[in-house]
Image (cartoon, grey):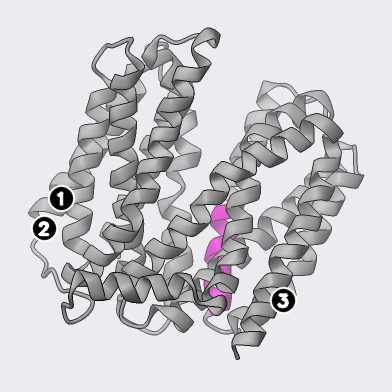
Amino acid sequence: MLLAIISLFVVSLGYGVVVPLLPLLAGAGVGDAASLSVVYAAYAAAKLVAQVPGGVWVDRVGPRLVLRVALVLFCLSLAGFLVPSTTPLWFAVWRALEGAATGLVYPAAFAAVLLGPGKKSGARLGTAVALGTSGMLLGPVLGGFIGEDPRLPVTVALGLAVVVTLVALLARAPTVAAVTPRSVGGELTQLWALARNPAFVGTMLPVAFNKFTYSALQAILPLHAAHTLQLGTRGITTIFALTGVGFGVMQVLGGALADRIAPRLLVAACSPVLLLGLAGAWLFTSVEGFALGYGAYIAASSIIFTATLQHAAQQHGQDRYGGMYGVLGTLTDVMTVVGPLVLVNIYGAVGQGVFGAMALLGLVFLLGFFVLGRAAR
């Protein structure tokens, strides 16, 4: 489990460092927006493509070997960013490699956590997600405060990744497959059936909504904080820092609660808080009112996210946790593309009303979760 957590942390730290610095690394300006969009899209596309094959591989050989290979690939991707170049294709290649490595890490880490000893898989899952993805919070801080040369924070992230990779490669531990090996075709056939299973589709909807909204909020929050809440740079960075802290703490709590309360019941209890929080962020224009509503959204969304993953593992994981997460991650990551396209444009049209739109969309996603799950029973 420790290797799973530090692997997640390393890839999330690298992501958090690289993304804000890409224009500086590539020497690109506003006029190069189209080229940069290809560089950003290369990561998402490669991650989507890698997750299902990566999950199948995890189920056949075990998570440790997959994590080792993924970490080596991730180190290579960070090293590629350090080579001076003004060709967007150069950075697109390394972003694609970074995305592929990340797409291998997530299903492997998910499987490693759930295959760990003991029955409290929810607590392990919440802790792993909270600690592992904290790099997304620390990455931008590292990139912003370590110096003017954008390659310096990338070098620091690469150094940490190399250390973790060496530990993973040198540590002696058995690589045990999660299941008795079966044909790749048979595995993919089962996963395709899972992707078409209404109960599984319903299970993944809260995760999809989380990614749908949060991916858009990364663009919306700086605009809203500056123009509506009248916050400066320090206030905006504080919002992002507190968001990361909130996600981390509440995911640990959500995992612990999921071990004691049926995940569907936990989602039902947190859903009104989530929707009311978004409504509050819509209705309140003061900093305090917005903080209350947004904080409720973060708390409820984090608990629902972890409880939903626990529910998916219990109901659909069986002996193929890696493949199951590969399917779930691939399907829900589509929302990280759709979310900004839809919600940022809504914000441009109606401003603060976008949070009301999120609440309405959240109601649809959550109703789908309960209706499809009930029908499957």
Position of the N terminus by quadrant: bottom left
Q: Identity of the amino acid at label 3?
A: Ala
Question: Image point 62% across, 64% down: which residue?
Answer: 206
For residue 268, which numbered disc appears in the image?
3
Q: Position of residue 256 (x, y in %)?
A: 53, 74
Residue shown at the point (73%, 75%) measured from the top left: 269
- Is 374 above or below relative to 355? below
Instruction: Determine which residue is flagged by label 1.
Output: 167
* Residue 111 located left or right of residue 227: left
The majority secondary structure of the magenta stretch comes to helix
Distance (Cα) linking label 2 and label 1: 6 Å
- The answer to whether mark 2 and mark 1 are in CB contact below 8 A is yes
Q: Quadrant of residue 364?
A: bottom right
**Residue occupied by mark 2:** 171
Is 48 drawn above or below residue 146 in the view shown? below
Q: Check disc 2 and report its element: helix, strand or loop.
A: loop
Residue 203, how many percent across, how many down? 57, 73
Q: Nearer the viewer, residue 344 or 147?
A: 344
Segment colored magenta:
246-258
N-terminal label among 2 and 3: 2
Residue type pointed to by label 2 = Ala
